[in-house]
Image: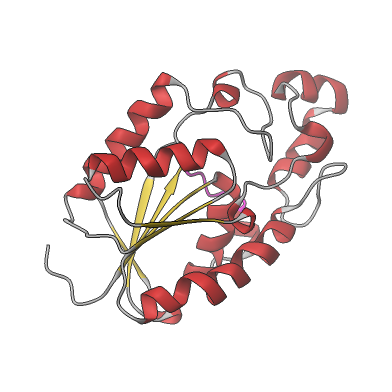
Amino acid sequence: MDNPDPYLVLVRHGQSEWNEKNLFTGWKNPPLTEKGITEAIAAARRVSKLAIVFDVHFTSKLLRAQQTGKIILDELDQNHILTIQNLALNERNYGDLAGLNKDESRERWGEEQIRIWRRSFDTPPPGGESLKDTAERVIPYFQNQILPYLSTNKNVLICAHGNSLRALIMHLEGISPSEIVKLEIGTGEPLVYSGSKEELLTRIDLY
């Protein structure tokens, strides 16, 4: 597909073992499930329709995102490119909730309190991060380390997490804090943007 502007592709990691068990994960480090591997392969096939040749791959310090990126690049026969891992792209830190079953947590703290911790913009769980906290590490990292590649017409792949990507999308699309908390990104779901300047990045629909 001809495109004069570089591509920025965001992919949430495939299903992890803790997703499957309905546990809060955060900075804990479970691997992908078989379903998660299949989701990463499917993401690669969707992205392949655009015939993008990536120049650099950014990912977090967490295994599930790293595995997803490796699978995608293997499927695209582009696993030779530079991969940069940084904890700035890590999932939101869930603090004391990490490793706990979500349903059992609702029973312990109440549905409303869990909803506030999960879906408010600036209220963190005990010992953890809010989405606001996550955005305050993701956005500067994007501006300082990732955007320069796009500014020089390089195609960028980011494999990360639901909340770190949510924070980045809020910034890229100018979505309000009250609206971004409603955004759901499925496991293994790719989102494609095009453009070389931060304020001109536009989302491209993948069918």
Give 50 or 70, whichever is nearer the viewer: 70
- Taking 21 as reference, is 150 above or below it? below
Q: Position of residue 180 (x, y in %)?
A: 58, 56
Q: Main secondary structure of the magenta part?
A: loop
Left or right: residue 100 versus residue 153 is right
Residue in view at x 48 percent, y 29 percent = 15
From which residue to which does the magenta span run? Answer: 181-186
* 60 vs 177: above or below: above
The spot of residue 58 in percent (x, y) is 46, 57
Residue 89: which quarter of the image?
bottom right
- Taking the spot 32% from the left edge, 75% from the top edge, the residue there is 195
Q: Is residue 13 visible?
A: no
Residue occupying image coordinates x 73% and y 26%: 99
Given residues 34 and 73, the one toward you in this image is 73
User: In the drawing, does residue 62 fall left or right of residue 3?
Assistant: right
The answer to whether residue 49 is seen in the rendering is yes
Locate residue 203, reporting x and y percent: 34, 64
Q: Give the x, y percent position of residue 50.
A: 18, 56
